[in-house]
Amino acid sequence: MNRDSLHFLFLNIGHFLDHLFMLIFATAAALALSREWGLTYGELLGYATPGFFAFGLCAYPAGWIADKWSRHGMMCVFFIGIGLASVATGFARTPLQIGIGLFVIGVLAAIYHPVGLAMVTQRWRNTGLRIAVNGVWGNLGVACAALLTGYLIDNSGWRAAFIAPGIVSIVVGLAYAALCNSDPVEKPATAVTAPMSAQAPDYKAMLLRVSGIVFLTTAVSSVIFQATTFALPKIFDERLQGIVGRSVSLLESLGLPGRVDLATMVGWFAFVVFVVASMAQLVVGMLLDRIGPRRVFMGAAAIQVAFFALMAGLKDGWALAVALGFMLGAFGQIPINDYMVGRLATGPARARVYGVRYVVSFTALAAALPLIAFIYEQWGFDTLFRVLAGASLVILIAVAFLPRKMPAVPA
């Protein structure tokens, strides 16, 4: 493996760990802490909310520091810092302590997206496919958070779900630091050739329109992404009781080693849905490079409208199939805004522009937690699915106003 491939691998592992750390608590809260600490699922979500706000609000400062100091250096801080914070969170004894730990994890997790994605779009061509591959790794982190946490709850306790990945991240960070020390010079940003002249009279108006659509759809799609990825273990815990129970009985009859319980099976089902749905990003990435973002984005939004509308009231097999459908749409749309930001942003300020994008994204993402908690406590998940169908329709309408050919900032 050459140095460029190894560096891309580290960036992909970083995306995997970033989403893994941010969603460990989602499964732990749904399957263990609500019983151990005697709190409702909605009450526990309140302790995760500050961490998700930090995840968003700290993205711009992280991008600014990376542009002014070192993107490689910030990635080292990310790997090692978030690992230490996760290990410390694993020793929390009260909800307040775990809330503080999740806040620190959120601050450090904010580093990855503005810095890592700026490096991905800076260093290589085939931007759409690169972002898609990187996005698949992030989604695998989402999937493994449910699987790993569910398994460790059954076999080692929820604390191990924070401690074990934390140790892995520290080791990866040390290896990444060694790679950077052997090749300390960061490659200069690659100029983007503009397909449209900046002197065209309608250029600024079109750029403003595209930017407005990017940030609107970023905010709304972040609410959808958070609602689906964070709540899916709890949704499956409620809606897949028949399938989960039969699966546990089947595995017990086979006499497999290790304890297999409900939490493990819920984690497995969530893992399978997340992994299969993440493959949509590869298709989207190739389509972005070939036909542009407008038609791809409209397709992803339409899929979500249809499947969210169908989900209300479903259980077991039908619920599993429809959940896979709306997750295909939710995951498939992730690379699209990053692709458009990469086309609009200049190289020297790219990390800061991505920082602004993720301030919008993850602030909306954090706001989704109180929304999930309120809707769930008052009306249940069926109402949440209807709200998400409406949000997807907003995206579909907004994307229809994108130009057929994207403007780009001149070199």
Image: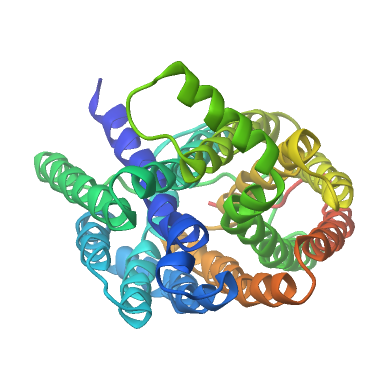
Front position in the image: 387 or 294:
387
Residue 11 at least partly seen: yes
As drawn, 304 above or below 247? below
**Left or right, 96 with reference to 181:** right
Position of residue 38 measured from the top left corner of the image (x, y, whole percent)? 46, 74
Picture mark count: 0
Image quadrant holding the N terminus, namely top left
**Left or right, 288 with reference to 112:** right
Position of residue 340 measured from the top left corner of the image (x, y, whole percent)? 64, 51
As drawn, 221 above or below 191? below
Kindly identify the residue that appears in the image at 46 percent across and 40 percent down: 261
Q: Quadrant of residue 222?
A: bottom right
Kindly identify the residue that appears in the image at 50 percent across and 33 percent down: 133
Front position in the image: 198 or 386:
386
**Left or right, 37 with reference to 282:** left
Kindly identify the residue that appears in the image at 35 percent across and 35 percent down: 8
**Farthest bottom residue in view:** 96
Front position in the image: 95 or 212:
95
Residue 201 at least partly seen: no
As drawn, 231 above or below 254? below
Kindly identify the residue that appears in the image at 15 percent across and 41 percent down: 175
Position of residue 349 measured from the top left corner of the image (x, y, whole percent)? 44, 63
Position of residue 305 measured from the top left corner of the image (x, y, whole percent)? 86, 50
